Amino acid sequence: MIISHAHRFVFIKTRKVAGTSVETALLPHLDEHDIYIHHLNQPINKCVAHAKWTDVRQRWPKVWDKYYSFSVERNPWDKVVSFYWWEKAVAEFKGEVFPAFDVWFDNKPRGVLRDWTWYANSLAPKVNRVLLYDDIQAEFDSLCTDLVIPITTLPRKHAHTRLLPDHYSLYYTDQRRDLVHQQFAKEISTFGFQFEDKR
């Protein structure tokens, strides 16, 4: 999470959407009075790296009302596969055996992979803008123009965890595809995400 007083913006960081890359690109534009919370052990009045919009509004209400806020979202079918590879990489780094995607997916509690409430209420996004991961560099370039900061090439962070370049659709049966649709219905209807079937 970033609050820039210098450029009057709030970045609500979500998961598996190049959030660390966006953070890294924004850091050179921050000054000593800005707020940057990267690690989960850096709480400020219950705000952490992945603080929700409600956390920021509660802690800094005037900032929330006056600053330009933004977040990032990703096609949910692709996002779930990215979550799988991230958790697999963490587990194997610890020397643990990690299950295949279908076993992992079937045992994952429903809803825990969603970030909708981090930047939205029950009806619609509460941030001023949601960047879309599928075209993140172009989205970020446009954001930089809006914020009046130099356009920067986003660095690749954590992209190494997905070891197989298979298209996300190859991980899904029709049933699991439909379950993701049910779980992420709000994101899909709001941003027009579609399941690109290359099976």
Image (cartoon, grey):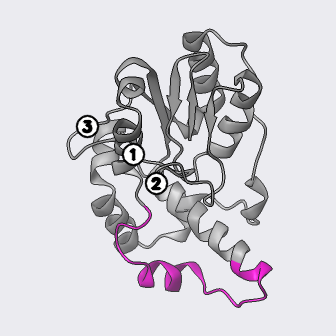
The answer to whether mark 2 and mark 1 are in CB contact below 8 A is: yes
Mark 2 vs mark 1, foreground winner is 2
The one nearer the camera, 131 or 27, is: 27
Residue 44 x, y percent position in the rendering: 53, 48
Q: Residue 162 occupies which quadrant of the picture?
A: bottom right
Q: How many residues crowd mark 2 within 10 Å: few (<14), some (14–19), many (20+)? A: few
Q: What span is in magenta?
A: 91-113
Tell me where residue 110 appears, x and y as whole percent: 34, 72
The tag earlier along the polypeptide, 2 or 1, is 2
- What is the crowding at mark 3: few (fewer than 14 residues within 10 Å), some, or many (at least 20)? few
Would you name the residue on which mark 2 appears? 46
Residue 87 visible, this angle: yes
Nearer-N-terminus badge (3/2): 2
Identify which residue is drawn at 66% across, 36% down.
22
Count residues near mark 1 (Cα–Cα under 10 Å), then give few for <14, some for 14-19, many for 20+.
some
Residue 37 in picture, x, y percent from top left: 62, 45
Please state, as top left, top right, bottom left or bottom right, where the N terminus lies in the image. Answer: top right
Is residue 32 a member of the stretch shown in magenta? no
Instruction: Determine the residue positioned at 73% across, 73% down.
Output: 89
Q: Cβ–Cβ below 8 Å for labels 3 and 2?
A: no
Q: Amino acid at mark 1?
A: Asp
The answer to the question of whether label 1 and label 3 lie on touching residues, with beta carbons closer than 8 A, is no
- Residue type (three-letter) at the residue carrying disc 2: Lys
- Quick check: 171 left or right of 121? right
Which of marks 3 and 1 precedes in the sequence?
A: 1
Which mark is on residue 124? Answer: 3
